[in-house]
Image (cartoon, rainbow, N blue to C red):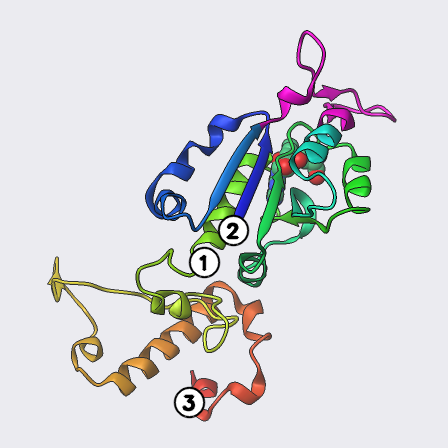
Amino acid sequence: MRLDIVSIFPDYFAPLELSLLGKARRAGIMDVHVHDLRQWTHDRHNTVDDTPYGGGPGMVMKPEPWGEALDTIAPAPAAPRLIVPTPSGRPFTQATAARLAAEPWLLFACGRYEGIDSRVMAEARTRMPVEEVSLGDFVLAGGEVAVLVMIEAISRLLPGVLGNTESVSDDSFAPGAMESLLEGPVYTKPPVWRDRAVPDILLSGNHGAIARWRRDEALRRTARHRPELLARLDPDALDKRDRAV
Ligand code: SAM
């Protein structure tokens, strides 16, 4: 998968060298290119922002550097999917990550200030798919951290990135049995720590009973932390024991 990232703070992306992401890059699974938006400015101050039309506080990112950046990185007929993080976008979910993990080429545009002049996205839509995506109902100072979050969620779904592919299917929100469910509590050795014992069932070796316990715990935790998710569970996929939990 090829990833291009445009930002006025390219240094934000140093963590892409670390851990799983770094390994995925070195293994050639992800080909990452980070670009400084200011290279597409032509004035002495490398200006990327200006005052908003209509008045109001803050500044807006100017369309010209963004237009040149997109022309250079994705000259027609090449067409990446352009991902624009913004609190006013559609929610980014595990399903979004899975869908984007199947794309060959993603281009991320990191906004700052009050965001990017809307004409940039409108013009880009005439030559590439564009998605405006929100990480949640809060406002960050810029798109860089949002893009790091998205890349981490997407990259761990790419074949060869995680050692044990099982761990993806057991995760909260994973398609299949965990869809719309939060994962329950997890434990490791020692069996007793500060007088707290691991639940007996996990030491029983009874895989059927352990799977059932995990599902019960996932249902309980989802009911406690995210009750609205339970309404999304497929009623036909619920058995009698699920309903009892
Ligand atoms: N004026 C914008 C609004 O109210 O929708 C907020 C702009 S925010 C201060 C600056 C940049 O941070 C945005 O352009 C976007 O790139 C990023 N950002 C902030 N919150 C975000 C969120 N919840 N999801 C994704 N990106 C976000």
How far apart marks 1 and 3 lie (CA) works out to: 34 Å
Q: To which residue does mark 3 refer?
A: 241
Taking the spot 17% from the left edge, 82% from the top edge, the residue there is 204
What segment carries the magenta color?
36-65
The foreground one among 199 and 45 is: 45
- Residue, disc 1: 158
52 or 200, which is in the foreground? 52
Q: Amino acid at mark 3?
A: Arg
Is residue 100 part of the magenta span, yes or no?
no
Bin the neighbour count of mark 3 within 10 Å (Cα to Cα): few under 14, some 14-19, many 20 and up: few
Disc 3 and disc 2: Cα gap in Å?
42 Å
Quick check: 237 left or right of 39?
left
The residue sitting at 47% across, 90% down in the picture is 239
Q: Is residue 71 left or right of residue 215?
A: right
Q: Which residue is mark 2?
A: 1
Q: Earlier along the polypeptide chain: callout 1 or callout 2?
A: 2
Camera-near label (1 vs 2) is: 2
- Disc 1 from disc 2: Cα separation: 9 Å
Asked if the residue at tag 3 contacts the one at tag 1, i.e. Cβ–Cβ closer than 8 Å, the answer is no
- For residue 4, the mark is none
Query: In the rendered structure, which disc, 3 or 2, sits on the residue that comes first in sequence?
Result: 2
Label 2 CA crowd tier, 10 Å (few <14, some 14–19, many 20+): some
> Are discs 1 and 2 less than 8 Å apart at CB?
yes
Q: Is residue 183 above or below residue 53?
A: below
Front-lying residue, 87 or 156: 156
